[in-house]
């Protein structure tokens, strides 16, 4: 084992990186084939958008969310054309980004902390945790694209931290990464803010001189950002800045102290990979009760890591302070000194603080589901090399390095075991998103609807979009909150089509014996309407509506 480890750390960097990325790909593909086998309703929207792109539509944003770019849908449309439409090809773009993220973190860790930390952090990310795998291979969120763009941005700025010596092509690429990431997801701001502060800190120590080169580098950055964010800018200029309006009119954050407490007791155990995420409180409580030992271990690991980051030697605040001190001693390329300080190190520390403050202080962390399934916090995995450096700093002795390697391998192995052995209770096909890692199949329901020539099906949001995707829009699913009350309509064109569909080709789907089922039956009786009543598992389907003679 020790000989293998020495070979991995001594091998050429690209070989080591390739091996870890292959491991990451194999693990993710295995989970996609066994655990995350189907798309939920939100992910199905990406597939529907891909259908529309193939038909000539050119959406700028995810349907119904004018702040999240549609890059995943364009990628899915390409793979649909190459390999056919399905759950696998819809998620293939995010899968590729998820693998690329592991490689990007490896190179960032190698630049800042050396091959040992780089390999440990990349290995940990390659094999989990489960929240990272689920959120970075699920389409429809844009997190993993931002994480790749942000990590590459940090990598370039760690290599070229000074605008006076930054090559113009590098400045252009940094701008492109920032703009593209910002169009894809507003979470890119969490990367852009520390990057901007790091560049400004570098300039603040040397006044005068290099003004022309600074102007050229800034111009390249701004030009690249404008090009990368061109779809976002063009759409907002024509629609009166709808993205800003949408984001600024969101409901304010909740109780920040409660959010911080839940972050510690719920999000941290999930982020360690030792607790299975579940957005429904009752299911999360059920899973933690079944695996109480893992929850306690995950909670202890999470608190220990947080305490080390805040209170340990060379903690986050000391590293951020070093971001300003290091400019006095480093050369143009920002190579770390013997103490391990570098502009990139301080930038990563500032990034961690930005992520946590954004989560606690904004409305994104206020919802209970945000801590039970902390998708908004997964950008923190970019800082995995920094976390490892807190425990096994550069220059540590052989014994401490072996202990660090053993701890990471053990944590990854436990995370794999939790993912493999956790038995989730079967949930209803109409259950809310995140109740389980993968929603139940609805193939039989889709076949039932198509065999009865149903064109439009009214049902819950989490089922309606899946019906549309899995039938390739032969059946259009329209979400309803209750009988006679429409829900969140992601595709407004469906409503227009539904008005021209005859009653005998409509269907209403409810849970058997539910309140909505009883209300709909009474409505049919009072309006003297006949309908075929079909059942599939725990669902009831009303179709073939006609007036009684």
Image: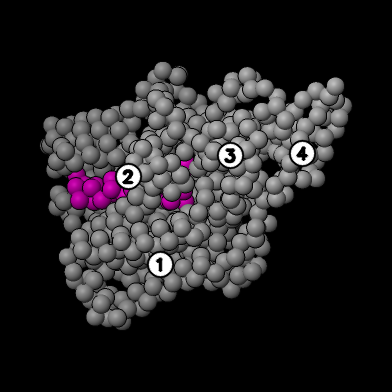
Residue 149's disc is: 2
Mark 1 crowd level (few <14, some 14–19, many ≥20, 10 Å Cα) = some
Residue on which disc 3 sits: 467
Task: Identify the image quadrant of residue 453.
Answer: top right
Majority SS type along the magenta span: helix
Q: Which residue is mark 4?
A: 533
Within 10 Å of the Cα at label 4, are there few (<14), some (14-19), or many (20+) other Cα atoms? some
Disc assigned to residue 312: 1
Chain part drawn in magenta: 135-162
Marks 2 and 3: which is nearer the front? Answer: 3
Earlier in the chain: of badge 4 and badge 1, it is: 1
In screen coordinates, is 174 left or right of 517? left
CA separation in Å, label 2 and label 3? 33 Å
Residue 58 position within the rendered picture, expressed as x and y whole percent measured from the top left: 40, 26
Mark 2 or 4 closer to N-term?
Answer: 2
**Image location of residue 60, percent across then percent down:** 41, 28
Question: Magenta span has 158?
Answer: yes
- Of circles 1 and 2, which is in front? 2
**Sequence order check: which comes first, mark 3 or mark 4?**
3
| CB under 8 Å between discs 1 and 2 | no
* Nearer-the-camera pick, 541 or 255: 541
* Disc with the residue nearer the chain's start (1 vs 3): 1
Q: Residue furthest right?
A: 526
Q: CA distance from mark 2 to mark 4?
A: 51 Å
Q: Nearer the viewer, mark 4 or mark 1?
A: 4
CA gap, disc 3 and disc 4: 19 Å
Question: Which tag is nearer the camera, tag 2 or tag 4?
Answer: 4
């Amino acid at each position: 084992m020790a000989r293998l480890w020495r070979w991995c750390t001594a091998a050429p960097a690209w070989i080591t990186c390739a091996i870890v990325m292959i491991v990451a790909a194999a693990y993710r593909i295995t989970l996609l084939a066994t655990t995350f086998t189907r798309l939920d309703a939100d992910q199905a929207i990406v597939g529907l958008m891909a259908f529309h792109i193939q038909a000539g539509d050119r959406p700028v944003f995810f349907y119904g969310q004018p702040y999240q770019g549609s890059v995943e849908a364009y990628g899915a449309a390409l793979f649909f054309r190459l390999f056919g439409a399905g759950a696998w090809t819809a998620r293939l773009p995010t899968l590729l980004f998820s693998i690329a993220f592991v490689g990007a973190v490896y190179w960032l860790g190698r630049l800042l902390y050396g091959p040992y930390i780089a390999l440990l952090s990349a290995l940990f990310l390659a094999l989990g945790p489960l929240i990272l795998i689920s959120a970075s291979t699920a389409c429809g969120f844009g997190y993993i694209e931002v994480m790749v763009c942000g990590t590459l941005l940090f990598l370039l700025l760690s290599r070229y931290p000074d605008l006076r010596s930054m090559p113009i092509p590098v400045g252009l690429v940094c701008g492109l990464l920032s703009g593209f990431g910002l169009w894809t997801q507003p979470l890119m701001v969490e990367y852009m803010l520390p990057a901007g502060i790091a560049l400004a800190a570098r300039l603040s120590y040397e006044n005068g001189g290099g003004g022309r080169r600074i102007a050229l580098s800034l111009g390249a950055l701004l030009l690249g950002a404008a090009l990368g964010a061109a779809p976002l800018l063009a759409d907002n200029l024509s629609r009166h800045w709808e993205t800003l309006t949408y984001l600024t009119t969101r409901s304010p954050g909740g109780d920040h102290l409660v959010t911080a407490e839940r972050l510690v007791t719920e999000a941290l155990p999930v982020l360690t990979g030792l607790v299975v995420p579940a957005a429904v409180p009752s299911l999360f409580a059920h899973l933690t009760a079944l695996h109480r030992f893992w929850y306690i271990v995950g909670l202890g690991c999470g608190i220990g890591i947080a305490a080390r980051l805040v209170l340990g030697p060379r903690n986050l605040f000391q590293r951020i302070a070093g971001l300003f001190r290091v400019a006095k001693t480093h050369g143009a390329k920002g190579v770390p000194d013997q103490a391990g300080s570098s502009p990139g190190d301080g930038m990563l520390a500032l990034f961690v603080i930005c992520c946590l403050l954004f989560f606690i202080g904004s409305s994104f962390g206020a919802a209970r589901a945000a801590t039970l399934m902390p998708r908004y916090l997964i950008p923190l995995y970019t800082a995995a090399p920094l976390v490892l450096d807190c425990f096994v700093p550069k220059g540590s002795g052989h014994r401490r390095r072996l202990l660090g390697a053993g701890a990471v391998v053990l944590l990854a192995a436990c995370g794999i075991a939790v993912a493999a052995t956790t038995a989730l209770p079967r949930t209803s096909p109409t259950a809310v998103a995140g109740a389980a890692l993968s929603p139940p199949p609805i193939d039989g329901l889709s076949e039932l609807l198509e065999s009865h020539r149903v064109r439009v099906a009214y049902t819950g949001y989490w089922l309606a979009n899946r019906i549309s995707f899995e039938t390739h829009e032969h059946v259009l699913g329209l979400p309803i909150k209750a009988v006679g009350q429409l829900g969140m309509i992601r595709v407004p064109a469906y409503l227009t089509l539904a008005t021209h569909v005859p009653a005998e080709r409509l269907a209403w789907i409810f849970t058997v014996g539910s309140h909505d089922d009883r209300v709909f039956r009474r409505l049919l009786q009072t309006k003297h309407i006949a309908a075929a009543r079909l059942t599939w598992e725990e669902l009831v389907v009303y179709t073939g509506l006609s007036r009684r003679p």
